[in-house]
Amino acid sequence: MAQLFGREWTREELMRRAGLTSQLGGVREVELRDGTGRGVRCAEFETGSGLAFTVLLDRGMDIGATRYRGASLAWEAAPGPAHPAYFEKDGTSWLRTFHGGLVCTCGLTSAGAPCVDEGETLGLHGRISHLPAASTWVDSGWRADECELWARGRMRQAVVFGENLTLTRRVWTYLGSSTIHLRDVVVNEGYKTVPHMMLYHCNFGFPLLDEGAELLAPSRSVKPRDAVAAPGLARHAAYEAPIDGYAEQCFYHDMIADEGGYATALLINRAFGGGQGLGIALRYRQAELPCFTQWKMVCAGTYVTGLEPANCLVEGRDKDRARGILQFLEPGETREYCLEISVLDGLEAIASAEAALVKA
């Protein structure tokens, strides 16, 4: 049943009161018409609970701007959701078209810092977030008293004499829901073994992120990525007001999964709305995504934190290979990844999610 306007409703009860389901919530396909985003196809979701988000069909089906009752949950980077034609692959030029957004996908054969790995020059975070989806399907439908909203499509990362990989993504939610579900299936459709790196760059910003916000994560241990992050280790989970000239800090978490194999991290702001409280719960299957990086960037003008489940670290493919943790896809091999992001509306919801966390 749909949870809307403070109560549960059957399909019959709602449709006796509404001309179209879109009066209550829904999903529609649109196209950006201006600036560097011109031509980018999008799927705009509204669940009726107050949750609204955009899936960027031409940007790897990433999840872009996301709001809950008018308040942004995601950080939107200055370049915006630029058309993939503007992609620059070398070095850190990926940042010139980094849209931020709730979920920016990194991979499929490389992720993390630019490097040279076995003679191949690799740019920051790979190509997948700049590949348009094909065979897209944006729609909604009722199953008994539950109305599902979805977007589905497939990206292909391929090169002659190299990799031939597909990523089939489905993003969905429900009428009345405050949770976004994402399922990816990656297939090696080629005939050679290729490196496989997958990182979900989940970016949260103001007003969810603000002075006093906290990261709650069931971690066995937390380690700084480098010497820059080391002095911030003691305060890694606490977020400050914007700081001029702040240098990014990254921390590696050894997360603990629950009995079902899922790890959950919470980003909470108890002071939001004058003490009403707002937060998110990020939940993912740990077996496929054993690594978790916290990106803390509380710089004035670039005020964001990234929570990043992955099958790799973020120092580059050459470093993962040297550590012996680089993963590979064999010909015909398939990998599946699942992610959920839920809104925590109010102090009671925050307390309930905190109580349910696996204890380190």
Image: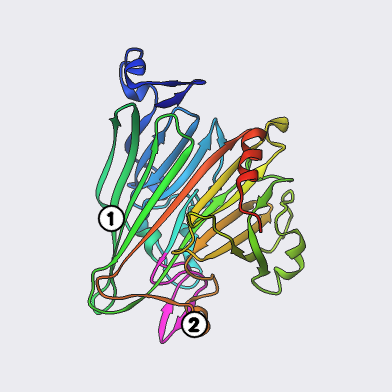
Please name the residue shown 33% across and 23% down the image: 21
Quadrant location, the C terminus? bottom right
Q: Residues within 10 Å of mark 1 (few under 14, many from 20)?
A: many
- Dot 2 corresponds to which residue? 324
Estimate the x, y position of residue 350 in percent, counting from the top left.
Answer: 64, 39
Asked if residue 108 is among those painted magenta in the image, a careful observer would answer: yes
Magenta stretch holds residue 323: no
300 or 105, which lies in front? 105
Camera sees residue 212:
yes
Measuring 23% from the left and 76% from the top, which residue is drawn there? 160
Q: Is residue 68 above or below residue 339?
A: above
Q: CA distance from mark 1 to mark 2?
A: 30 Å
Query: Residue 96 appears at what percent x and percent y?
Result: 49, 60
Can you see residue 249? no
- Per the picture, the main secondary structure of the magenta-coloured stretch is loop
| Residue behind mark 1 | 154
